[in-house]
Image (cartoon, helix red, strand yellow):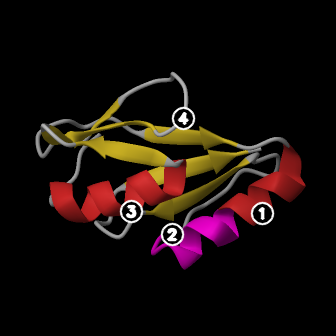
Amino acid sequence: MNVSDVDKAGAFWSAALGYARQPHNPAFLVPEHGSGVRLHLDVEDRTHLDLWADGEQDQRAEVERLITLGARRVEWEYPDDADFVVLADPDGTLFCVIA
C-alpha cells in the first residue's frame, strides 16, 4: 500500500485492522491473532485498499471507528447504488469501506 510515512501509516493501519507491526520490519503488518493476509506499507507502491463490512450498519460503524482513529471523509461523486464510502488515512492515502 502506498504511503509517504511508513511509521505514521503503520500506527493507523495496525489500529484500524487489529494488526501488529513486525518488529524486524515495521513496514509489514500482520494479524495480531491467527492467520491472515499480510499488509505491506511502501513509499513506492500504488495499491488501493478496500475494507469489507457486513452490511450497511456495520459499514457505518466501521467508518466512524476509522474516523476516530484519524481517517477522514473524502469528497466523492458516488453513484446512486454506491455500496462504498471513500476515506483517507492520516497520510492522505485513499481507501474504501464496502458494505
Q: Are marks 4 and 1 in contact (CB under 8 Å)?
A: no
Per the model, the C-alpha gap separating discs 3 and 2 is 17 Å
Identify which residue is drawn at 56% across, 77% down: 68
Q: Mark 1 and mark 2: span between their CA atoms?
A: 15 Å
Left or right: where 61 falls relative to 96? right
Q: Residue at x 76, y 45 (%)?
A: 83
State the SS at label 3. helix
The residue lying at 40 percent from left, 63 percent from top is 89
Q: Is residue 45 left or right of residue 80?
A: left
Q: Provide the residue designation for mark 4.
A: 33
The reply to whether the C-beta atoms of the residues labelled 2 and 4 are less than 8 Å apart is no
Q: Inspect the image, locate mark 3, and give the three-letter code of the amino acid beneath it.
A: Phe
Chain part drawn in magenta: 63-71
Q: Earlier in the sequence, mark 3 or mark 2?
A: 3
Q: Tell me the distance, in whole angstroms, between the alpha carbons under discs 4 and 3.
A: 18 Å
Q: CA distance from mark 4 to mark 1?
A: 24 Å
| Residue highlighted by disc 3 | 12
